Image: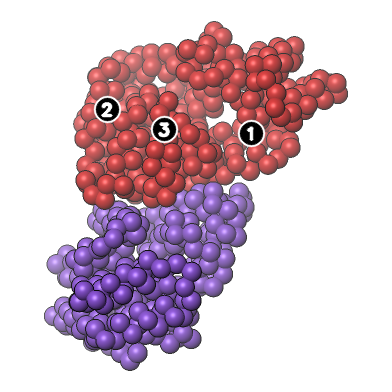
Chain colours: A red, B purple
Amino acid sequence: MESIVTLRKSIDKRLAQLELKAQPKNLYEPISYLLALGGKRFRPLLVLLTAQLRGTFSSQILDPAIAVEVFHNFTLMHDDIMDTAPLRRGQPAVHEKWNQNTAILSGDAMFVKAYQLITKISPGHLPLAMERFNETALQVCEGQQLDMDFEQFSEVSQTDYLEMIRLKTAVLLGFSMELGGLMGGFDRKDQQQLYEVGENLGLGFQLMDDLLDVYGDQQKIGKQVGGDIIANKKTFLMINALDLAGTDVRRQLNVWISIRDVDPKEKVAAVKNIYDRLKIPDLVKIKMNTYFDEAFRLLEIIDCNKEGLKIFNNFARGLIVREG
Amino acid sequence: MESIVTLRKSIDKRLAQLELKAQPKNLYEPISYLLALGGKRFRPLLVLLTAQLRGTFSSQILDPAIAVEVFHNFTLMHDDIMDTAPLRRGQPAVHEKWNQNTAILSGDAMFVKAYQLITKISPGHLPLAMERFNETALQVCEGQQLDMDFEQFSEVSQTDYLEMIRLKTAVLLGFSMELGGLMGGFDRKDQQQLYEVGENLGLGFQLMDDLLDVYGDQQKIGKQVGGDIIANKKTFLMINALDLAGTDVRRQLNVWISIRDVDPKEKVAAVKNIYDRLKIPDLVKIKMNTYFDEAFRLLEIIDCNKEGLKIFNNFARGLIVREG
């Protein structure tokens, strides 16, 4: 049974040792660059911690766990092009530091690296791992497509928004836990239930992100407070505010959404004030906690190793910000 | 034993029936669009014809064969963005018909579809098929990167050029035959030799393409004669001409390469004239035939079904343009 600190070290060490050829430099350097920018390594940790729910940690499960992190970073490399995001983890995004073509092609190569890593799973597990990884990867593409589509829509329903974040974010956390379950030796039914645990955690964390973007501590969240409001993003908060607002307040919100050349601070303060009046934070917290509660309820009814469960819970519950 | 016509029909039918969801439309429509533009289906035919060298055709090998075609089309979708190519098979490229983001993301989804199809290989063959497919996909990325890198170089050596086309084009033909060999039931040594047959064919065909671009019949090759000369591409012809030319002719060539705002016809005629004087076509034909001869020599020493071999040879030899 390994601690989170130990597992994280193993993940970072393995990522730093990823076999990448030296040439062509423009193909492989961006991959090392992006992976070296860090990150919480949330997904591979989820794989390893889930495997530990049944057995003990074995270094053989490290490569497939790393595959999920490499895949996730591949999606970031391509998403940053599509979203014209200049920064990633506070550093220039690959398409900015190099150029767009490099980010396209290095991303493609990075996607293959993810497949190489997942292929290192034991041969008996490979067909199922591949089938589920492929399905998940396709869903993540669907989620990104919906996210881009929604930018063009004047209205997005709550249901459609939740489906979008499910595809874009939650299914990969679901897959991480399913993969951990597969490698840890859980039966298929438990693996599927572990998938649901991860999916629910993912939905909860995404709503938490939406909430923290407006109500979080700038230092803790490491980005500008109200960034989603400034960018007119149709987050769970905005969708619910538009749903709940009366004619008058809705008109005000729509003015703030459509207005250009406005002081960002003024805009954030005004929209936040509307959110407060409509008690949007309470509503989001209730919805978010529904997902978290469901995740931990589902996990409880799976037969787990007690110490593994304690470590898992420490990790997952530790990520949930209750204040703010 | 199936004829080329029958196999091609099976391939086209299966491609048209590829399970693609209806939504999100912007993710999946470009995939169907690109696949429906046609093409020779050279790579999946190579898979199926190679499998037939040992056994008979079974519909179970169709999906992995199709995987190679879908992968190839994915690379076209992304390459067309990088090369800012407006047309693909005479129709608007995906990034032109939709937009660049769509071409990036649909391409990614298409890559996953290729993996889904190859995953349908029998479970016993999956680990090797995945390992080899991953390696090949990575090499194809390397080839595209080198091709882009070479655009920035003032000089490219023959060796470097041949390595670039090996990676960008030939390894996928090698893999097609290796995969056919694996599914057809050849032993590992034969599979590897079949790979070499495909790789040599690929190198030969690429040199043939370079030659036909200048010396081909516009109607037969379906594109503008001399396109590579107009685009200042460092083809096998140009590299050899620069190698062989004396100081004077080399200076003339460099003027034609660096000149802007010139009548394309005049440029093509002038460079072609230099090629003729240096006997470049003969040199390219000799090199090209070396690859083809090696391919057929290697194939001959593999124990094949006679009828299958006849069909294979008809197909492969039929693609070699000896005149021109």
Query: Which residue is outermost to the top?
Result: A323
The residue located at (41%, 79%) in the rendering is: B268
Residue A293, disc = none
> Mark 2, chain letter?
A
Location of residue A322 in the rendering, given as x and y in whole percent from the top left corner: 53, 10
Residue A161, disc = 1
The residue located at (30%, 90%) in the rendering is: B322
Residue A92, disc = 3
Q: CA distance from mark 3 to mark 2?
A: 21 Å
Mark 1 lies on a secondary structure that is helix
> Mark 1, chain letter?
A
Please tell me which of labels 3 and 1 falls first in the chain.
3
Q: Quadrant of the N terminus of chain A?
A: top left
Mark 3 is surrounded, within 10 Å at the Cα level, by few (under 14), some (14 to 19) or many (20 or more) other residues, namely: some
At label 1, the amino acid type is: Tyr
Q: Does the CB distance between marks 3 and 2 fall below 8 Å?
A: no
Q: CA distance from mark 3 to mark 1?
A: 29 Å
Q: In front: B153, or A303?
A: B153
Residue B43 as seen in the image, left or right of residue B177:
right
Location of residue B140 in the rendering, given as x and y in whole percent from the top left corner: 32, 59
Please tell me which of labels 1 and 2 falls first in the chain.
2
